[in-house]
Image (tube, rainbow, N blue to C red):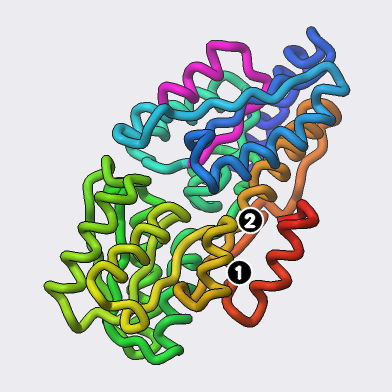
Amino acid sequence: MKLLTVLATSAALALSATYAVAGSHGGANIFVVGGKPDDPFWSRVKKGAEDAGVVAESQGGSVTWLGPQNYDNLGPDAAELIRQAIDQGADAIVGPDWVPEAMDPAFEAVVAAGIPLVIYNAGGIEAADRLGALNYVGAVDYKSGYAGGEYLGNAGHKNGACVNTLPGAANIEAFCNGFNDGLAAAGGNGSVLQLPATAFGDATAVAQAVRAHVLQNPQIDAMFAIGDQDTNATISGIQQAGKAGKVHVCGMNFNDSILANIQQGTQACAIDQQGYQQGFFAVSILNNHVMYGTTIPTREILTGPGVIDASNVELVIAGVKAGAR
């Protein structure tokens, strides 16, 4: 009971402080920490945040996107962006908890400053609870990887490898752990092909590593990639190894080329975590909280995982053309 009282008091103090700041300029200035804007997945998250920001802007507020230049030093760089948002007078902050040991102190500083926080994309409800955030918006990373492993395992594939190009990032580790467990649940065995962070998004580096790995490990018949660019590079590496049709691929997220892969049969499936929704919901929740004091009682708001394969790819493509996916 005492803990509930403390939490309620802390929440009231934070809310009153927020109203005071927002009231000084008429609207909520919301800062969103995310990936590189030229990253295909994060460009969709950014669009969702900016579309929700139209409402904030109409009320005199704003949405500011902060992303790293690269992913080489992900945790410390993201932590610095969170601190920049505090220093620049954010009324509310959205951020993924990619590398907790590096980023949690910065998130704790957000909450200590009385700034409402939503964790999205990475970290799950566990991070939201640990850090005192209002909500978690996104997929559960482990379950996303699990869905990919289970899908390939149920299709009869027995030996898989998860291509990890962001070692140390908690969400990526969760993807790979989930993939391996999902494959194991279907009677297979999983492993991890771990590459340096400089390989993320480097199609040549990933393709070469995949080519070498499948040639050195001929038992591999399934691979899982952590994003759009790495998925295409993984498929390229498999083709270069002469293993097309023998090693099947599933990957996180999708873009036009990924959907074309599925249509053409060069990719088995994609795991959709609906990045647009992550950005849109997170900003909307915070804008309404700052302006009107609203809260969402369902604190874990899941946007995935969903499986895209040959059975539903045409419907997804129609959704993309309509601007809904």
Tell me which amino acid carries mark 1. Answer: Gly
Q: What is the span of residues highlighted in magenta in the rendered image?
A: 79-96
Residue at figure coordinates x 49%, y 48% from the top left:
122
Relative to 37, is 303 above or below? Answer: below
Q: Position of residue 208 (x, y in %)?
A: 22, 57
- 23 displayed left or right of 3: right
Q: Position of residue 295 (x, y in %)?
A: 77, 41
The foreground one among 51 and 187 is: 51
Query: Do the residues bearing badges 2 and 1 touch, measured as CB atoms within 8 Å?
Result: yes
Decide whether residue 105 is among the magenta residues. Answer: no
> Which callout, 2 or 1, points at the residue further toward the start of the chain?
2
Q: Position of residue 232 (x, y in %)?
A: 41, 59
- 211 displayed left or right of 250: left
Give the residue number, with chain letter if any, for mark 1: 306
Residue 231, quarter of picture: bottom left
Give the residue number, with chain letter if any, for mark 2: 274
Residue at figure coordinates x 59%, y 72% from the top left:
308
- 101 displayed left or right of 66: left
Decide whether residue 81 is among the magenta residues. Answer: yes
Q: Position of residue 307 (x, y in %)?
A: 58, 72
Please indicate, yes or no, whether residue 13 appears anywhere in the rendered image.
Answer: no
